[in-house]
Image (cartoon, rainbow, N blue to C red):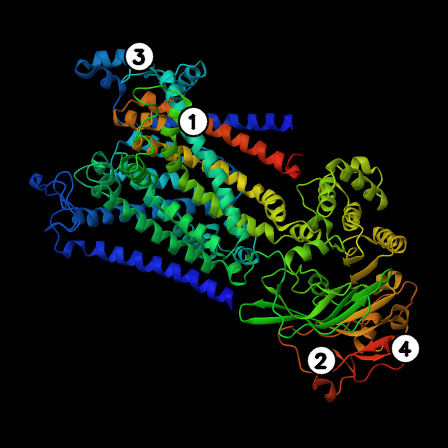
Amino acid sequence: MGGYILRRLLSAVPVLLGITVIVFLIMALIPGDPATAILGSYATPENVARINRELGLDAPLWRQYLIWLGNMLQGDFGQSFALNRPVLDEVLERFGATLILAGTAFVLCALLGVIAGTISAANQYGWADKAITFAVLLGISIPSFFLGMMMILLFAVRLRWFPVSGMWPIYGARDAAALISHLAMPALALAVVATGVIARLSRSALLEVLRQDFIRTARAKGVHERSVIWRHALRAAMVSILPVLGIQAGFVLSGAVYIEIVFQWPGIGRMLVDAILRRDILLVQGGVIVVAACYVFFNIIVDVAQSLLDPRIRT
Amino acid sequence: MTSAFLLFSRNRLALAGGILLSLVVLLVLAAPILPLTDPDVTNTANRYLPPLSEGALLGTDHLGRDLLSRLLWGTRLSLAVGFAAAAIAATIGAAIGVVAGFYGGRLDNVIMRGVDMLMAFPYILLALAIVAALGPGLLNALIAVAAVNVPFFARNIRGITVGLAHKEFVDAARLSGLSRPQIILTEILPNVLPIIVIAMSTTIGWMILETAGLSFLGLGSQPPQADLGSMLGEARAALISHPHTSVVPGVMILIIVMSINLLGDGIRDALDPRLKSGALSRPMAATRVRRQAPAPEPSLEGILTVEGLETEFHVGPRKLRAVGGVSLSVKPGECLGIIGESGSGKSVTALSVTGLVASPPGVITGGAVRYRGDDLIGAPYEHLRAVRGREIAYIFQDPLATLHPLYRVGDQLVEAIQAHQKIGTEEARGKAVELLRDVRIPNPERRISDYPHEMSGGMRQRVGIAMALANDPEVIIADEPTTALDVTVQAQILSLLDDLRRSRDLAIIFITHDFGVVAQLCDRVAVMYAGKVVEEGPTKAVLAAPRHPYTARLIACVPELGGGRRRLEAIPGLPPAVDRLPEGCAFAERCNKARSACREGHIPLAQKGDRAVRCLFPEESPAREAAE
């Protein structure tokens, strides 16, 4: 088991390197040069050449990449010119907020999706199946940002159940209750699409498994149909549901960008959009790399969970 | 009938989606000729007019622009960008996938590594990075959305292409001297095209959403040009004061994406042949029962009796009669063999006993199955469950497929015990060890924590038998338990079953297609053909002097060790299809003694002493000579 985790961690190294290459290349494509941007009206040819030399921008691309990578490995992601603070500090602070939001949404969509899909499969063509199928269709068709806006109108403005936006109250204690009341709507809005996708997939995975011979064996043993579905079938179906959970985690993380804008959540998605609009390139780079790295590690966790679930792939 | 209706209802949903989408498309195509105000003309005097205002059906936005006009023009833009992104992603992705899959080797390796790398990004990061590099704008958003979806198509299409690249028709094209690009164009592409269409139809809605999302963030279309996403983005500032400006574009996105999803599902279902056969239906907890007539009066003796059992498979409009009125019985301590070719209905008969026939499509349409006099057909689920494993237990054919692959065999045994006995897990575990010892598994304390895949075939089948014995049942139904095993293991399993039967006074129904096995184990044997019992009697008597021509031919098929140069006779032809059973004797077509009377009317099972045969002209002399 330990060996498997180690192997899996090592295999992440080339992926992470690949990600840095892709990000570096995309950023290197940006038209216009940083020296001119920094110098503004002082951009005489001499000054530009001096800045380029100072920043190492006159070196060949591969050397620039290595320097950049080396700096990052030492925790130096550069300085955000718009915020005038180290990129890493800003990114980590924002990413914490995003993790709270996306993490909650992910737990919600995994639980609700798998449960709804299982109920749907267990009652195939019954009323519960039809209701869930319809809800799923709505869920995967509605843009999460529109859903979030409608939730604000209904639950915050009309019913006043939840605050309209933000992560903390402007005045008052920053305690768990305050966080939960601020978190409820954005987490739910974020979870809806992924819940739909997971429910859909869980349903078909279960239908596939329910036809297998070992399900008939369980029934022949006299095992109650409840256990047949929730123990035997669901466990076997999880083998194909788990990888989808990994993929959906990426979609939840992606969707967080919209939800953070709609609900004014101080997360990394909003930071990235602002940084792009302000052309704060170093901040974009740092944000993208940290989120992508986190996603890669999450997928390793999914793989390890997969090997715990299925003894056949451990060896 | 119901499955046909369900398929129709699914298609009806797809149809609804198609109609809705066509309406939207027609409306936006007609936008230039409709009497609409210019979508970009501002009129600050008439800001935020509510819907149904004069001259503005859907109201106006924060600059007093007509929302209906903006909606139609915005939809036009969103649809165009979404479809363009899908087409670009599909074309590039499919090209990469086909090349990688067809050429294989290092090229494939390098390409797929790159694809995996791109897929390691949450999609929006890549899209954001691309927009950050190219700058905000609708065209750049389109490029970003297309680029993000290329890996998805590449991977899907590669998978299909790898499968195709080694098919015979591709080899034939190679041999005929076509170049590789020619083969791709003439042989591969036509075959992957439907897959591309399916993949596109299921992702296009998603791409429209993604593009709208980028515009919503202000990274897509720039003012005054507006697509649905940027309309929603601009309206957000006035969400609380003037919600209609947000609702109008939001609902439109919902309508478009939903109708595309409905249509896409319809296309996928229509192209997925598994759905038509009902193969994706879930088998219910117990076989459906639709008895046409009341259960027959009890007439047989035994702990378990089957009387006039009829089981059908309803597949679409076809009704396959797998079991057509079978009667059997077994007494405690007795072993009854059921023998027949595959498809003769012997397994379905066995599974019908406790309602284990997969349903849909299986339906029990008649007869009775009585255990100690109680009819199990149509019994409530809880009653069936109490009988399953407790009174009547099964041993199935392939223990690798019939044991749960993800649970340790010990846990599966404990579960079997606890399904009927209220005892603690520790005690049940002790019993499980005893059971494994009873079926002669060496080292049971250790083997109990093995997974099925860690055991040999023979050991697995012993676990299967132990599981059947877990609750000391009265009847064991063994459905070809030794077919998947090699001969020496087979002999061990048979002698184990025989010992267990004698020591526990078990009634065993043993299903097989092997007369050798029947001869070793069974007191009586019933021969099945095309869903009916054609001959029944004590094993020795039937083997020595089969009376039905089919039994005779079946025995003649068994090679005998040391039997010298006897010619083996295969039975000519195939069993009849069970949805087109001939009138009269089902074996007549393959029987060399058949006369015209054999093909007319029902032939009853004629009882004579302890023998019964369903034949108008039964064999008189011992069959072995006849076969020579």
Give the residue number, with chain letter if any, for mark 4: B622
The image quadrant where one finds the N terminus of chain A is: top right
Give the residue number, with chain letter if any, for mark 2: B589
User: Between A239 and B439, which is closer to the camera in this rendering?
Assistant: B439
Report crowding for label 3: few under 14, some 14 to 19, many 20 or more residues within 10 A (C-alpha): few
Q: Where does residue B329 sit, x and y in percent of width and height?
A: 80, 67
Disc on res. A99: 1
Disc on res. A53: 3
**Dot placed on the residue nearer the N-terminal end, 4 or 2:** 2
Q: Amino acid at mark 3?
A: Arg
Q: Secondary structure at mark 2?
A: helix
Q: Secondary structure at mark 1?
A: helix
- Tell me if I can see residue B126 in this picture: no
User: Between B219 and A259, which is closer to the camera in this rendering?
Assistant: A259
Picture quarter containing residue B612?
bottom right
Instruction: Tell whether label 3 touches label 2 (CB within 8 Å).
Output: no
Report crowding for label 4: few under 14, some 14 to 19, many 20 or more residues within 10 A (C-alpha): some
**Disc 1 vs disc 4: which is toward the camera?**
1
The image quadrant where one finds the C terminus of chain A is: top right
Q: Separation of disc 1 and disc 4 at Cα?
A: 82 Å
For this view, does A22 lie left or right of residue A110? left
Q: Separation of disc 1 and disc 2 at Cα?
A: 72 Å
Chain under numbered label 3: A
Q: Amino acid at mark 2?
A: Glu
Q: Residue at x 38, y 48 (%)?
A: A138
**Disc 1 vs disc 2: which is toward the camera?**
1
